[in-house]
Structures are given as structure tokens and as C-alpha cells.
Amino acid sequence: MPDGTSTANQLRPKLATTLRDGYSLAFLRRDAMAALTVAIVALPLSMAIAVASGVGPERGIYTAILGGFVVSALSGSRFQIGGPAGAFIVLVAATVARFGVEGLLLTVLMSGLMLTLLGVLRLGSLIRHIPHAVTVGFTCGIAVTIAASQLRDLGGLRLAAGEPGPLIPKLTALAAALPTLAPATLALGLGSAALIFGLRRYRPNWPGMLIAVVGASVVAALLHLPAATIGSRFGGLPHGLPMPRLPAMDAHLALQLVPAALSFTLLGGIESLLSAKVADGMTGRKHRSNMELIAQGIANVVSALFGGISVTGTIARTATNIRAGGVSPISGMLHSAFLLLFILVAAPLASFVPLAALAGVLVAVSWNMAEKSEFARLLRDWRTAAVLLATFGLTLARDLTTGIIAGCVLAALFTMLKRPVPEEGDGGPR
């Protein structure tokens, strides 16, 4: 089986290659089963990520359906599954808090255009050279931030004012609100997280997140627990997709959104190419990095037009697709079709989902996202430790972009200092 190395730099979707090589009914059956498995994983996760990002759960579903379909149709990887990702929660929430949903949609649109341009200019390889310590540092920083952002819904805490964005003020405000802790809500959230961890260990092939969310919904409804639900906060999910429309365009606003759009672009490029690289390692194939960036860019543009949030390649769902037997981009396209079928048929059921259960889902996601053993390993060398801790600390204290830039600059300085200085006359004619 060819690994695709000879065509790795082509701007050609893997779907076209798959169809050219021949696609059989047996492949379709395998892709359909994998797609159903991935859709079951993506459904609760997409809603949870959207809620944690400060928008309605339907926007996470739109992102998974439309953005996920475009990613698979145009992807530079045969196995990539696109959709909303936990890594973007902090960026999306901060953008919504400052500029509103319309500002977010314009940011996603701008980021999509930037990603497309990076791919067209064949700059995908530059993103892939970000130091490993930087990647681990910002990933762990994001995981901590996500976990902190779920404490309010996990315990049903009631804050006197809005929840602060920065980590330390957030934790201070949440600590002050501890007297409002709702034991029943906390039990639902922790129970959901514990069930996900338990199933992941003892029944790894079961859809732990969906089972946890459905179980918590049933328990809350039968016992009439006073826990906030999707229905009580957001109303029900719509029964279909919205009509496309351009976000409100404003030159002054667009200029203000450039830093956020750059952050979305940087993180989206890193996440999608990391996911494609993981898929390569699991299958022995080779993704086309520049085509992957183009796919992610167009998917973000489409997501913004339909009211979705940011799209990227998702490592967990991509790995699930491979383990479930997916063999081509058609599995990712079918996963989007299954999600669309859900909101057409069973959207009213989402109203009963407790927000604490979705918080439990994201607590599990943040725990799995944090590369704990790799973090500890990188601390053994003082240079990689310095890069790691600078990226991790600044991601927590300031923002993702500051952490990545600081980590990359520090890593570059260490690389220059380690390089031996040539003695006089070295390299010259003798």
C-alpha cells in the first residue's frame, strides 16, 4: 500500500485520490460503521464545547455537521475528522465576551481565509516545525483553563457578577461562590465524569460520553433534580440547519479582530496538522499538509456563514475513526450526515441534558488532553523545561498567542546558543 510520500506536497484532496484508486461497497460499509461511531462521540462533545465557549449548543452541532463535512471532503488526510475542539474554548469564549457572537463569526471567517492562504502559499511545513515543548506547554495550559471554566456548571455555583475570564480572578470568584454549591448538581457532574473514566478503562469501545450524558439526563428527569439544563438556559435545539449569511462586516471591527483571528489561525493550523500526523502514525500513510490547511480554511469560512464556531482537525475523533475501521474521507462526510439526522429527528431530547453533565464531559476531555507524562519527561532537561514552563505559564497568565510566541523565541535562542561557533578559518579554502 503506498504511503503517499511522493504526493505529500500536492494540493489535491485525498477524497479525489480515494475515488481515483477505486472505492468499493465493502469500503462504504466500513466507512458507514466508523461514521456512526464517530457521530456518537461527536454529538455530546460538540454541544459541550459550544456551551463552554459561551454560545448555544446548536452552534457546536452546526460546526460539526458543516465544518466536519467540508474538512473530510477537501482534507489532505484520508482519516481526518473536523469539528469544534476543546482547545478553542478559551479563544472562542474570550472573543464572544468582548465582541459578541457577530464578532466571533467574523473572526472565524477571517481565520478561515488566513488558513486557506497559508495552504495556497504552501506554508504548512512551517507550522509543523513548532517545537514539541511549546506544543505540550500550550496544550496543558489549555487543559487547565478548560477544567477551570467548567467548575461553575459542575457545581451549580451562582456568582454575584459575571464570571471573570483570567484564571486567577476566575478561581477567586468561584471560591467566593462556594456557599451556593448545589450538591445534586455536583453529583451529576462528577458522576458523569467518573462514568466516562470508568468506561474508558473497562469498556473502551463503548460511547462513554454519550452514555454519561444520557444517563445524567434520565436521572435528573426521574428524580426531578433542580439542575440547569440545555432547555432551561438555551431552549431547545433547532430542527435543521440555518440559512447561510455573511457576518456583519465593519472595517473598524475587523481591524480589532485581527489579533484574535491570528490566534485562531495559529491554533487551528497546529491542531489540524497534529491530528493528521497522529493519523499518519496509526495508518502508515502520509497527509498533505498544505491541502489540509486549505480544507480547514474553507471549512471555517463555511462554518461562519452558517453560524458555527471554529473548526479544526480533532485528534480524539480522528483516532476513533481509524480504530472503528474508517478507510477514506467518506467516513467523515457520513459522520456529518448522521449528526444532521440527529437534529432532524431527536433535537427536542437535548433540552433535558443537564449542563453539569456537559461540564463532566469537558472535565474528562481536559484530563485526557493534558499530556501529563510528556510534561514530566520534558522537565528533566533544563532547556526544554524552560520552554515548556514559559509556554505553559504565559498561556495561563496571559493568552495562547503570548505563550506560543514566548516559547518559540526561547527555543530559538537555546538552539542558537547550542550551535558551535566556527573557529577562524573554518570552512574556507586550504
Image (cartoon, helix red, strand yellow):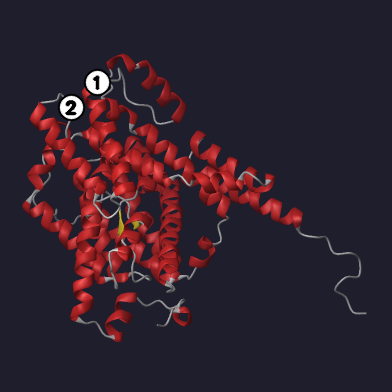
- Is 338 left, or right, of 195 in this rendering? left
- From the viewer's side, name the closer residue of 105 and 123: 123
Q: From what the image shows, is residue 410 above or below residue 195?
A: below
Q: Where's the N terminus, which quadrant?
A: bottom left
- Is 46 left, or right, of 370 in this rendering? left
- From the viewer's side, name the closer residue of 85 and 325: 325
Residue contact at pointers 2 and 1, CB within 8 angstroms: yes
Residue type for callout 1: Ala
**Secondary structure under the numbered disc 1 in the rendered image:** loop
> Can you tell which mark lies on residue 198?
none
Check disc 2 and report the residue beneath it: 227
Few, some or many C-alpha atoms within 10 Å of disc 1 (few <14, some 14-19, many ≥20)?
some
The picture places residue 119, in percent across and down from the top left corner, at 43, 68
Res. 273 image quadrant: bottom left
> Can you tell which mark lies on residue 182?
1
Q: Where's the C terminus, which quadrant?
A: bottom right
- Is 73 left, or right, of 147 in this rendering? left
- From the viewer's side, name the closer residue of 125 and 110: 125
